[in-house]
Image (cartoon, grey):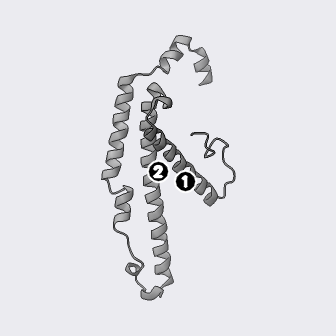
Amino acid sequence: MRAEMEGMTSGMRTQAVKYSADSMQKFKQGVDALIEQLDGSGASAGKLKADPVTRTQFGGGGAAWNEAQGAYSAYNETLHSLVELSGLLKDCLEGLGIAVVASKNGMEEMDDDVKRKMIQIHQRTYDAKTKADKEAGAGGTDAAEGDGSFK
Protein backbone atom coordinates (compact mmCIF):
# COMPACT_ATOMS: atom_id res chain seq x y z
CA MET A 1 0.00 0.00 0.00
CA ARG A 2 2.82 2.39 0.89
CA ALA A 3 4.50 1.78 -2.45
CA GLU A 4 1.25 2.56 -4.19
CA MET A 5 0.89 5.82 -2.27
CA GLU A 6 4.48 6.82 -2.99
CA GLY A 7 3.86 6.16 -6.66
CA MET A 8 0.93 8.59 -6.81
CA THR A 9 1.53 12.01 -8.17
CA SER A 10 0.92 15.00 -5.96
CA GLY A 11 -2.25 15.86 -7.84
CA MET A 12 -3.66 12.37 -7.39
CA ARG A 13 -3.07 12.51 -3.63
CA THR A 14 -4.82 15.86 -3.44
CA GLN A 15 -7.77 14.50 -5.41
CA ALA A 16 -7.97 11.43 -3.14
CA VAL A 17 -8.60 13.56 -0.06
CA LYS A 18 -10.55 16.36 -1.68
CA TYR A 19 -13.80 17.19 0.09
CA SER A 20 -16.95 16.50 -1.91
CA ALA A 21 -20.04 18.10 -0.39
CA ASP A 22 -22.42 15.89 -2.37
CA SER A 23 -20.76 12.60 -1.45
CA MET A 24 -20.39 13.66 2.19
CA GLN A 25 -24.06 14.67 2.34
CA LYS A 26 -25.10 11.29 0.89
CA PHE A 27 -22.83 9.53 3.37
CA LYS A 28 -24.30 11.52 6.30
CA GLN A 29 -27.83 10.72 5.12
CA GLY A 30 -26.87 7.04 5.13
CA VAL A 31 -25.51 7.34 8.68
CA ASP A 32 -28.67 9.17 9.79
CA ALA A 33 -30.80 6.41 8.23
CA LEU A 34 -28.82 3.79 10.16
CA ILE A 35 -29.41 5.67 13.42
CA GLU A 36 -33.13 5.90 12.66
CA GLN A 37 -33.22 2.20 11.80
CA LEU A 38 -31.41 1.31 15.06
CA ASP A 39 -33.73 3.50 17.14
CA GLY A 40 -36.79 1.94 15.51
CA SER A 41 -35.64 -1.64 15.96
CA GLY A 42 -35.85 -4.02 18.86
CA ALA A 43 -32.12 -3.45 19.34
CA SER A 44 -32.51 0.14 20.52
CA ALA A 45 -31.35 0.66 24.09
CA GLY A 46 -34.80 1.87 25.19
CA LYS A 47 -36.63 -1.13 23.77
CA LEU A 48 -34.13 -3.59 25.21
CA LYS A 49 -34.78 -2.17 28.68
CA ALA A 50 -38.55 -1.76 28.20
CA ASP A 51 -39.76 -5.23 29.26
CA PRO A 52 -37.35 -6.65 31.84
CA VAL A 53 -37.61 -10.21 33.04
CA THR A 54 -37.78 -10.66 36.81
CA ARG A 55 -36.00 -13.29 38.86
CA THR A 56 -39.27 -15.09 39.69
CA GLN A 57 -39.94 -15.73 35.98
CA PHE A 58 -36.99 -18.15 36.00
CA GLY A 59 -38.72 -20.41 38.55
CA GLY A 60 -37.44 -21.83 41.81
CA GLY A 61 -39.33 -19.36 43.97
CA GLY A 62 -37.40 -17.81 46.83
CA ALA A 63 -34.12 -18.42 45.00
CA ALA A 64 -34.48 -22.15 45.73
CA TRP A 65 -32.86 -23.19 42.47
CA ASN A 66 -29.26 -22.15 42.02
CA GLU A 67 -29.55 -22.93 38.31
CA ALA A 68 -32.45 -20.48 37.95
CA GLN A 69 -30.43 -17.81 39.75
CA GLY A 70 -27.50 -18.48 37.42
CA ALA A 71 -29.73 -18.23 34.35
CA TYR A 72 -31.24 -14.99 35.63
CA SER A 73 -27.78 -13.53 36.34
CA ALA A 74 -26.60 -14.49 32.84
CA TYR A 75 -29.75 -12.95 31.34
CA ASN A 76 -29.23 -9.69 33.25
CA GLU A 77 -25.55 -9.51 32.33
CA THR A 78 -26.32 -10.19 28.66
CA LEU A 79 -29.15 -7.65 28.60
CA HIS A 80 -26.90 -5.02 30.20
CA SER A 81 -24.18 -5.73 27.61
CA LEU A 82 -26.68 -5.48 24.73
CA VAL A 83 -28.06 -2.17 26.04
CA GLU A 84 -24.51 -0.82 26.36
CA LEU A 85 -23.59 -2.09 22.89
CA SER A 86 -26.68 -0.49 21.36
CA GLY A 87 -25.83 2.84 22.99
CA LEU A 88 -22.22 2.65 21.83
CA LEU A 89 -23.31 1.81 18.29
CA LYS A 90 -25.61 4.82 18.24
CA ASP A 91 -22.79 6.99 19.64
CA CYS A 92 -20.44 5.68 16.98
CA LEU A 93 -22.89 6.51 14.20
CA GLU A 94 -23.67 9.94 15.67
CA GLY A 95 -19.96 10.70 16.04
CA LEU A 96 -19.40 9.64 12.45
CA GLY A 97 -22.18 11.99 11.33
CA ILE A 98 -20.67 14.87 13.30
CA ALA A 99 -17.24 14.11 11.87
CA VAL A 100 -18.66 14.23 8.33
CA VAL A 101 -20.11 17.68 8.98
CA ALA A 102 -16.87 18.82 10.65
CA SER A 103 -14.82 17.60 7.70
CA LYS A 104 -15.93 20.57 5.65
CA ASN A 105 -15.29 23.51 7.99
CA GLY A 106 -13.52 21.90 10.95
CA MET A 107 -14.53 21.49 14.59
CA GLU A 108 -13.78 25.16 15.28
CA GLU A 109 -16.75 26.24 13.16
CA MET A 110 -19.24 23.93 14.87
CA ASP A 111 -21.78 25.08 17.45
CA ASP A 112 -20.77 24.60 21.07
CA ASP A 113 -23.60 22.13 21.72
CA VAL A 114 -22.41 19.93 18.85
CA LYS A 115 -18.84 20.10 20.17
CA ARG A 116 -20.09 19.10 23.63
CA LYS A 117 -22.03 16.21 22.08
CA MET A 118 -18.87 14.97 20.34
CA ILE A 119 -16.87 15.28 23.57
CA GLN A 120 -19.56 13.33 25.46
CA ILE A 121 -19.53 10.60 22.80
CA HIS A 122 -15.74 10.44 23.06
CA GLN A 123 -15.88 10.16 26.86
CA ARG A 124 -18.57 7.44 26.86
CA THR A 125 -16.60 5.47 24.27
CA TYR A 126 -13.38 5.88 26.25
CA ASP A 127 -15.11 4.79 29.48
CA ALA A 128 -16.54 1.70 27.74
CA LYS A 129 -13.09 0.82 26.36
CA THR A 130 -11.47 1.24 29.75
CA LYS A 131 -14.12 -0.97 31.36
CA ALA A 132 -13.73 -3.63 28.66
CA ASP A 133 -9.94 -3.56 29.02
CA LYS A 134 -10.23 -4.06 32.80
CA GLU A 135 -12.68 -6.93 32.36
CA ALA A 136 -10.37 -8.53 29.81
CA GLY A 137 -7.38 -8.07 32.11
CA ALA A 138 -5.64 -5.71 29.72
CA GLY A 139 -3.54 -2.97 31.25
CA GLY A 140 -2.75 0.61 30.22
CA THR A 141 -4.36 2.85 27.67
CA ASP A 142 -3.06 5.20 25.04
CA ALA A 143 -2.04 8.61 26.39
CA ALA A 144 -4.34 10.55 24.06
CA GLU A 145 -7.47 8.68 25.11
CA GLY A 146 -9.63 10.10 27.85
CA ASP A 147 -7.01 12.55 29.05
CA GLY A 148 -8.94 15.58 27.88
CA SER A 149 -6.86 15.94 24.72
CA PHE A 150 -10.01 15.76 22.59
CA LYS A 151 -11.49 18.77 24.36
Q: Secondary structure at mark 1?
A: helix
Residue in the picture at 58% in, 20% down = 5
Decide which of tag 1 and tag 2 comes sooner along the chain: 2
The x and y percentages for residue 99 are: 46, 34
Q: Which mark is residue 88?
A: 2
Q: Quadrant of the C terminus?
A: top right
Residue in the picture at 62% in, 23% down = 2
Label 1: few (<14), some (14–19) or many (≥20) C-alpha neighbours in 10 Å: some
Residue type, label 2: Leu
Residue in the picture at 34% in, 30% down = 26
- CB under 8 Å between discs 1 and 2: yes
- Say left or right for 70 vs 97: right
70 above or below 135?
below
Decide which of 8, 128 is in the foreground and name it.
128
Q: Which mark is residue 128?
A: 1
Decide which of 68, 111 is in the foreground and name it.
111
The x and y percentages for residue 51 are: 34, 68
Q: Residue furthest left?
A: 40
Q: Residue furthest right?
A: 139
How many circles with numbers are drawn on the protein? 2
